[in-house]
Image (spheres, rainbow, N blue to C red):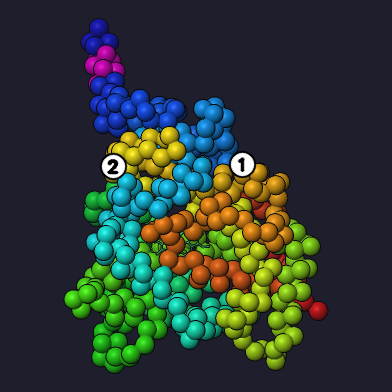
């Protein structure tokens, strides 16, 4: 009897907790005007279905199934404890992205905001956000800087590939290493060496705690992340000290751009906010870039016609140069038409950022779809990128489809609005230069592998390829 009473009390307790959790999550107060959909299970909602579908070979099925069921591309779901309006309608997605700061606010998990810290681009809004975003976005804005960045990216990729010949390399590892070295140069002016190795090691530890309980307890993930961040900051402090001792007038990297940025009153960005942003920028550039690089290698290999055309385009560039002569920004911007098509097609199929999260801060309705305040909005790009009315045979890698102009609302791998990717040019440049040196120097054979789509794009076996020098 006592056992039954205890069991009864436990069940009642659990139900009470779930009821409170549902109440907290707004499930019991679902506005009638919200789009149709399901909240799934109490508390966890449809998170598990989303993860399961996202990890499958066809991650677009999650939204496709719901669109078919509810008869519209905007529907209610429930992710990570929040009622969510998910959209695969390109106009609605554009509306959400453009209305950042008005009806919607960028919404990273609390642990992400807390780890990157005060004033970091992920956790800041309003004027400071604008200032940092513009400093990063406009960094590649002069011809001279473009050429310097071009040379840096080229140096890192060429040096990394110089020992590929005759070996089996893991493209995923190589791309991650190259992207980290590139971003270290771009952010802090560091050439590959002991310092970048140290930063990479510490940064990897830092990122392990990115989804964790944001409380520092000795030994927990969050604490280890914070310790690694402190170690990275020590490296940055040394660089900043050096630059203040020997000032220079032109911005050479993002650290310079942030150190020299001033507001209308001549106020500078405090050092701790600069360091928080550099950590944030490592995160922004270190994950998505390599995903796109390695998938471009895979797609091009699997489409011999594209590989031939790519070789032709890059050999045409080489023929105009002396042996070993570096690439120029003009080569990248004006002589790589087909390469840019390959890059677009890779981003369309891979979706390094398949969607972005926003918090609804004010009730709003658009195209008849209502977004209740306090919910999440989830503009999801993956399904728009696979819309067969825009991209016939959408699952096939077909870079020639980009010969025709595709309206920009159907292609948003870098997001949009005030939060549009601030490093998109760098991301594309990395892919273009990697492809240049790959196709002009080598032939290669892929070994069995498979893409994993979630939580980040990666390969089961890290994409091993055996490389030979091109005769
Ligand atoms: C192919 C590679 C890349 C892809 C697909 C990509 C994609 C994106 C997307 C979709 C967003 C928007 C996030 C949102 O709206 O919440 C974003 C933001 C951002 N990206 Fe990238 N990114 C790439 C590479 C890079 C690189 C190399 C950098 C290096 C600096 C970078 C820096 C940023 C920053 C700073 C933001 C935040 C902008 C803000 O919140 O104001 N990204 N990226």
- Nearer to the camera, 436 or 389: 389
Q: Quadrant of the C terminus?
A: bottom right
Q: CA distance from mark 1 to mark 2?
A: 34 Å
| Among the 4 quarters of the image, the one containing residue 42 | top left
Residue 342 versus residue 199 in the image, above or below: above
Badge 1 residue CB within 8 Å of ligand 1: no
Instruction: For ligand 1, give the image quadrant.
Output: bottom left
- Name the main secondary structure of what is drawn in magenta: helix
Q: Is residue 339 left or right of residue 221?
A: right
- Of the numbered discs 1 and 2, the one sitting upstream in the chain is 1
Q: Is residue 273 left or right of residue 444?
A: left
Cβ at disc 2 under 8 Å from ligand 1: no
| Residue interval drawn in magenta | 6-14
Camera-nearest label, 1 or 2: 2
Instruction: Give residue 7's mark.
Output: none
Q: Nearer the viewer, residue 332 or 298?
A: 332
Query: Hey, which residue is sitting farthest top in the picture?
Result: 1
Percent position of residue 211, x then y: 36, 50
* Residue of label 2: 362
Q: Which residue is found at the position 49% from the left and 74% from the top?
A: 182
Callout 1: SS: loop
**Residue at image coords 54%, 29%:** 71
In percent of width and height, residue 457 lies at: 54, 53
Residue 468 is situated, as x and y percent measured from the top left of the image, at 75, 73
Queried whether the magenta region covers residue 9, the answer comes back as yes
Count of numbered marks:
2
Q: Which residue is mark 1?
A: 58
SS for callout 2: loop
State which quarter of the image contains the N terminus: top left
The percent coordinates of residue 203 (x first, y second) are: 39, 65
Which residue occupies the foreground of this view, 181 or 99?
A: 99
Whether residue 24 is in magenta: the answer is no
């Amino acid at each position: 009897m006592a056992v039954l009473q205890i069991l009864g009390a436990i069940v009642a307790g659990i139900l009470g907790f779930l009821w409170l959790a549902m109440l907290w999550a707004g499930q019991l107060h679902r506005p009638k005007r919200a789009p149709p959909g399901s909240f799934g299970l109490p508390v966890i909602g449809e998170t598990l279905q989303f993860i399961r579908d996202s990890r499958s070979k066809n991650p677009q099925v999650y939204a496709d199934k719901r669109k078919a069921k509810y008869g519209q591309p905007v529907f209610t779901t429930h992710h990570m404890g929040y009622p969510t309006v998910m959209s695969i309608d390109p106009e609605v997605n554009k509306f959400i992205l453009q209305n950042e700061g008005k009806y919607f606010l960028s919404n990273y998990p609390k642990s992400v905001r807390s780890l990157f810290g005060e004033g970091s681009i992920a956790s800041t809004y309003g004027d400071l956000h604008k200032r940092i975003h513009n400093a990063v976005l406009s960094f590649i804005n002069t011809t001279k800087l473009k050429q310097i960045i071009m040379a840096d990216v080229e140096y890192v990729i060429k040096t990394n590939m110089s020992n590929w010949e005759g070996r089996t390399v893991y493209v995923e590892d190589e791309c991650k290493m190259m992207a980290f070295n590139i971003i270290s140069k771009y952010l802090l002016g560091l050439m590959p060496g002991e310092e970048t190795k140290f930063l990479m090691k510490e940064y990897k530890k830092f990122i392990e705690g990115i989804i964790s309980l944001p409380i520092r307890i000795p030994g927990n993930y969050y604490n280890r992340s914070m310790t690694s961040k402190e170690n990275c900051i020590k490296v940055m402090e040394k660089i900043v000290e050096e630059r203040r001792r020997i000032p220079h007038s032109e911005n050479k990297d993002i650290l310079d751009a942030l150190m020299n940025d001033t507001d209308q009153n001549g106020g500078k960005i405090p050092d701790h906010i600069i360091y928080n942003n550099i950590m944030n920028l490592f995160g922004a550039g270190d994950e998505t870039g390599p995903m796109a690089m390695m998938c471009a290698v895979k797609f091009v290999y699997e489409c011999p016609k594209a590989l031939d055309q790519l070789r032709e385009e890059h050999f045409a560039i080489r023929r105009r140069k002396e042996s070993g002569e570096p690439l120029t920004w003009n080569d990248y911007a004006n002589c790589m038409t087909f390469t840019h098509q390959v890059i677009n097609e890779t981003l369309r199929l891979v979706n390094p950022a398949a969607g972005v999260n926003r918090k609804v801060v004010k009730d709003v309705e658009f195209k008849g779809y209502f977004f209740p305040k306090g919910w999440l909005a989830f503009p999801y790009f993956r399904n728009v990128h696979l819309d067969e009315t825009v991209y016939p045979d959408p699952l096939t890698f077909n870079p020639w489809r980009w010969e025709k102009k595709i309206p920009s609302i159907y292609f948003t791998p870098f997001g949009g609005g005030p939060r549009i990717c601030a490093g998109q040019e760098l991301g594309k440049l990395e892919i273009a230069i990697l492809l240049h040196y790959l196709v002009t120097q080598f032939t290669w054979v892929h070994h069995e592998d498979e893409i994993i789509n979630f939580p980040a794009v990666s390969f089961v076996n890290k994409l091993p390829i055996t490389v030979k020098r091109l005769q």
